[in-house]
């Protein structure tokens, strides 16, 4: 039983890690705490619904549609909303992303209706038995794809020249500018990636559950995940996501289904009081 | 002690006060009889409003005022405001439903409970700041609402906690007019009290702390104490509002105090103008008017246009949310000072124009 | 074009602080080394920001005049484009990427180069500043001030710019290091023919290094000429000694 819970937690946690990674990329690049990340997950699920059920695209084109659409959304949001607010106080930026999430949510509910829509894709369903543990193929695929995406991003970030430029922009904005880096482009790229990663998460969560705006709550778990892992740390976000996934499943099973949120946020509170820079982050000079 | 002089400015202030007082006092009559000085008004002219919504607006004004005091004036960003409303509702359930205390005492108990929870919620500010502190308020929200949820499920019903009609002595507050008579002076009192607090020495120290903490500390201000006090006061008012909210709706479930509930208040103070108490009142009023205006548009649209029908009737709640959030975004980008900031700009332009003429 | 940098009647204002530069004109000839002198707040950094396209970042605008580089109008262009056009920038404060390694720092500067030239570019910088080669995989944030300055310089030079703008190189550095760095700057000037505009508070040092100089006071050019002429002029004495009583912040 424990292994069962653990493995589901790991599988879900991989998806959370993906969403948290997207969040961390946005935060590292533009210093924006994107409260709309949960809605980006929902957008991904609805991009999938549009592609599969409405446009009836073949699956590989649907993937392109989802990822491309999300990337475009991220770029647009940066251009129209984030860039004008650069340099403004934190509450403005936080509230902007919150208002954005509400706007997205109501827009989606007007267009698609408030109830969820089922999402069917050619992704494998069915169950695999490993000893006494049942693992659904969907969970496995989701975890695998998430890991591939995360690894892919890691390689991109570490080893390509564009990745280097992104790291430089995040390190010191002005230094990047004087080195000839088009920081605006880097920031748009960060938002495109952050949104696209969340959208992939939404594709899987939409099929694992149902494509609805309720998925926002799950997507929002990326926030505590990133904080627990360490806000400025990319690997920290991933580990944070895994932890949150595992803890969520454990709390859901062993305490009560409604308690999972609270347990995670209590953990968040503890981390904030004891080690605010997260498990993998570095202590910053002075109080944050 | 300066002598009070009858300057034209203070005379004008008195005039405004009398005018507003008259309007507010006459309002219930207009709303109940749907007529102004005997001339009947259509629904559209009344903006589709009734005293019920006005009362809800008054309660939200308490929420907006308390949040603005905390965030706009003390500089403590909090997205956990719903938690304190929940505290008030829970305190009411304990002290009224379970312990049977009289209404005024229940309100007091709710405020005290709010102050306690608020002070506790403010403790992380001693350790972390900025973004991390905002997250701690989010965590507080989840913890408190969970406690409320468990309490509700254990002692009451899954559907919600029922609340009795409040009464003072044998006088029951069971009509919108009576609620109005209770709420309006309360809101005015809280507004004036917070205003006075901001003008006091401690209040000004708090504003200094918000603007430049290092400088304030250097001047000998105990920022930690001030912060906790601000949190306590703000939460006490919010908790009081929560208790009134519970009584007013007569049935409340934990779902009512979700994150969206807290976000509404942040939206109100942004639109109204952060740091401006009167702005909070405007923000709460706009939040109230918007659904009514949109509701008023739907019958007129004639329902021939299917698209408009879908927009205005089927998904009216979502449309309101959409417009409200877009409004917040527009304000954030173009008018960061909110309505209060805009009115100051307008006033400056008006004075400049007058002086030039 | 014999003039690499041509500033004509430039005026700059900051959003909240009023005028910082008024009607400033100066030229940097091909292969020339020009020093920009003046006390704190005279407007030297403002001028550099106006030329390098960084005014926006610091809440200022060009309110009059023009800047040309190699015959092309560049005033108002964003900074990253100017770098690509051949303007190397070494702003004050050293601005290295603290969390990236030395080599990565240089690679960022080399991003404007075609891939085939990157290795040669790196080698050239390491040749110029052997200390950077020693520390090539270290995080830049851990290096000393002098090494960081060399890194900032190397990063700007790696793309072989035609014009190099250096702002307050000596601030916070030990005199010996400063002299060493200026020596390397001279080498760069002689071997590559890079034109340079150097802002330097240490007037003595600047005048011994540069060919010509301009003195700014309260946003205006009050003195210009060859380095020797400027060094000998009576106006230099008070600025040099820091006795200038009229020195004020902008507006």
Image: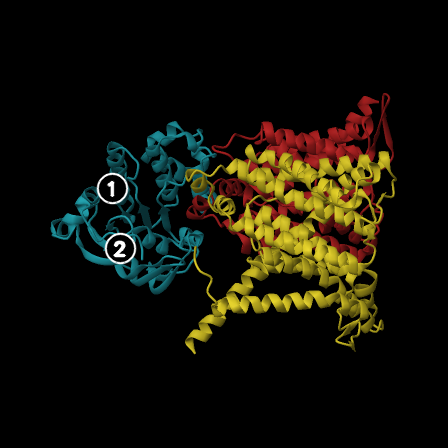
C103 vs C18, left or right, is right
Q: Where does the image place residue A169, in percent across and percent down from the top left?
A: 50, 43
Q: Chain of mark 1?
A: C
Tell which chain the image draws in red: A
| Quadrant the N terminus of chain C occupies | bottom left
Other-residue count near label 2 (Cα within 10 Å), few / some / many at <14 / 14–19 / ≥20: many
The quarter of the displayed image where residue C200 is located: top left
Q: Quadrant of the C terminus of chain C?
A: bottom left
Q: Nearer the viewer, residue A205 or C1?
A: A205
Identify which residue, B251 or B36, lies in the foreground. B36
Q: Position of residue A205 (x, y in %)?
A: 78, 41
Q: Residue C28: which numbered mark, if any?
A: 2
Left or right position of C70 against A173:
left
User: Is there any visible trace of residue A149 in the rendered image?
Assistant: no
Specify the chain shown as cyan: C
Residue for point 36% across, 47% down: C89
Report the front residue among A251 and B84. B84
Residue C31 vertical position relative to residue B80 in the rendered view, above or below: below
Mark 1 vs 2, N-terminal side: 2
Q: Are marks 1 and 2 on the same chain?
A: yes
Local secondary structure at mark 2: strand
Query: Is C123 drawn above or below residue C24 in the view shown?
Result: above
- Residue A78 image offset from top left, x and y in percent: 59, 53
Name the colour assigned to chain B in the rendering.
yellow
Q: How many numbered discs? A: 2
In the rendered image, residue A140, in percent from the top left (x then y), is placed at 78, 32
Residue under label 1: C186
Identify which residue is drawn at 55% across, 48% down: B197
Report, in whole angstroms, how far the alpha carbon at label 1 lies from the one at label 2: 16 Å
| 10 Å crowding of disc 1: few (<14), some (14-19), many (20+) | some
Quarter assignment of residue A234? top right
């Amino acid at each position: 039983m424990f292994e069962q819970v653990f493995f589901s937690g790991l599988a879900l946690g991989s998806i959370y890690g993906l969403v948290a990674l997207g969040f961390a990329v946005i935060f590292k690049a533009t210093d924006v705490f994107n409260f709309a990340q949960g809605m980006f997950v929902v957008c991904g699920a609805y991009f999938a619904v549009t592609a599969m059920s409405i446009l009836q695209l073949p699956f590989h084109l649907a993937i392109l549609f989802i990822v491309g659409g999300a990337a475009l959304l991220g770029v647009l949001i940066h251009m129209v909303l984030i860039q004008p607010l650069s340099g403004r106080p934190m509450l403005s930026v936080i509230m902007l992303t919150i208002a954005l999430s509400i706007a997205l949510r109501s827009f989606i509910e007007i267009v698609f209706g408030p109830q969820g829509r089922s999402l069917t894709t050619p992704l494998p369903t069915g169950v695999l038995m490993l000893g006494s543990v049942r693992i659904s193929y969907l969970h496995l695929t989701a975890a695998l794809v998430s890991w591939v995406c995360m690894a892919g991003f890691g390689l991109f970030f570490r080893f390509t020249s564009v990745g280097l430029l992104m790291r430089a922009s995040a390190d010191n904005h002005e230094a990047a500018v004087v080195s000839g880096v088009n920081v605006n482009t880097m920031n748009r790229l960060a938002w495109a990636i952050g949104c696209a990663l969340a959208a992939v998460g939404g594709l899987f969560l939409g099929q694992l559950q149902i494509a609805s705006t309720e998925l926002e709550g799950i997507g929002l778990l990326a926030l505590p995940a990133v904080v627990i892992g360490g806000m400025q740390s990319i690997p920290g976000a991933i580990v944070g996501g895994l932890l949150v996934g595992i803890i969520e499943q454990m709390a859901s099973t062993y305490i009560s289904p409604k308690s999972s949120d609270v347990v995670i946020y209590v953990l968040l509170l503890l981390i904030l009081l004891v080690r605010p820079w997260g498990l993998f982050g570095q202590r910053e000079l002075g109080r944050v | 002690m300066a002598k009070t002089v009858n300057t034209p400015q203070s005379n004008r202030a008195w005039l405004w006060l009398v005018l507003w007082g008259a309007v507010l006092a006459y309002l219930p009559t207009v709303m109940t009889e749907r007529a102004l000085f005997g001339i009947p008004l259509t629904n559209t002219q009344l903006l589709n409003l009734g005293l019920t919504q006005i009362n809800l607006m008054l309660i939200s004004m308490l929420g907006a005022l308390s949040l603005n005091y905390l965030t706009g004036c003390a500089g403590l960003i909090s997205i956990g405001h719903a938690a304190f409303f929940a505290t008030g509702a829970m305190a009411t359930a304990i002290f009224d439903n379970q312990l049977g205390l009289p209404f005024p005492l229940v309100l007091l108990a709710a405020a005290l409970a709010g102050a306690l929870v608020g002070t506790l919620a403010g403790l992380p500010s001693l350790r972390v700041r900025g973004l991390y502190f905002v997250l701690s308020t989010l965590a507080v929200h989840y913890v408190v609402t969970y406690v409320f949820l468990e309490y509700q499920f254990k002692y009451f019903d899954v559907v919600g906690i029922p609340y009795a009609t409040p009464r003072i002595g044998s006088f029951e507050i069971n009509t919108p007019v009576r609620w109005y008579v209770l709420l309006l002076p309360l809101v005015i009192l809280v507004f004036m009290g917070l205003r006075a607090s901001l003008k006091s020495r401690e209040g000004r120290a708090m504003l200094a702390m918000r603007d430049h903490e290092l400088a304030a500390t250097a001047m000998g201000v105990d920022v930690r104490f001030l912060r906790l006090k601000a949190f306590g006061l703000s939460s006490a008012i919010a908790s009081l509002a929560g208790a009134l909210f519970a009584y007013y709706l007569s049935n409340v479930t934990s779902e009512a105090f979700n994150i969206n509930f807290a976000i509404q208040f942040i939206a109100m103070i942004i639109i109204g103008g952060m740091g401006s108490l009167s702005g909070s009142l405007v923000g709460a009023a706009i939040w109230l008017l918007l659904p009514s205006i949109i509701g008023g548009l739907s019958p007129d649209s004639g329902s021939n246009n299917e698209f408009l029908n879908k927009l205005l009737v089927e998904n009216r709640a979502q449309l309101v949310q959409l417009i409200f959030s877009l409004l917040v975004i527009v304000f954030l980008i173009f008018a960061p000072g909110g309505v209060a900031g805009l009115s100051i700009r307008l006033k400056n332009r008006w004075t400049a124009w007058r002086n030039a003429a | 074009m014999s003039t690499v940098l041509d500033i004509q009647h430039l005026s700059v204002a900051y959003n909240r602080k009023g005028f910082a530069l008024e009607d400033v004109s100066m030229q940097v000839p091909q292969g020339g080394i020009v020093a920009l002198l003046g006390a704190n707040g005279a407007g030297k950094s403002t001028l550099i920001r106006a030329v390098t396209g960084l005014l926006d970042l610091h809440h200022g605008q060009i309110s009059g005049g023009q800047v040309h580089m190699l015959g092309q109008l560049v005033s108002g262009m964003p900074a990253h484009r100017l770098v690509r056009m051949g303007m190397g920038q070494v702003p004050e404060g050293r601005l290295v990427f603290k969390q990236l390694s030395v080599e990565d720092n240089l690679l960022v500067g080399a991003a404007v180069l075609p891939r085939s030239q990157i290795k040669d570019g790196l080698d050239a910088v390491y040749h110029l500043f052997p200390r950077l080669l020693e520390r090539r995989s270290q995080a830049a944030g851990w290096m000393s001030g002098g090494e960081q300055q060399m890194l900032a310089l190397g990063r700007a030079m790696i793309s072989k710019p035609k014009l190099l703008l250096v702002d307050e190189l000596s601030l916070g550095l030990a005199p010996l290091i400063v002299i060493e760095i200026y020596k390397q700057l001279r080498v760069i000037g002689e071997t590559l023919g890079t034109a340079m505009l150097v802002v330097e508070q240490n007037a003595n040092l600047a005048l011994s290094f540069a060919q010509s100089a301009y003195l700014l006071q309260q946003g205006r050019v009050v003195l210009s000429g060859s380095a020797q002429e400027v060094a000998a002029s009576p106006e230099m004495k008070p600025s040099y000694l820091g006795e200038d009583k009229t020195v004020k912040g902008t507006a």
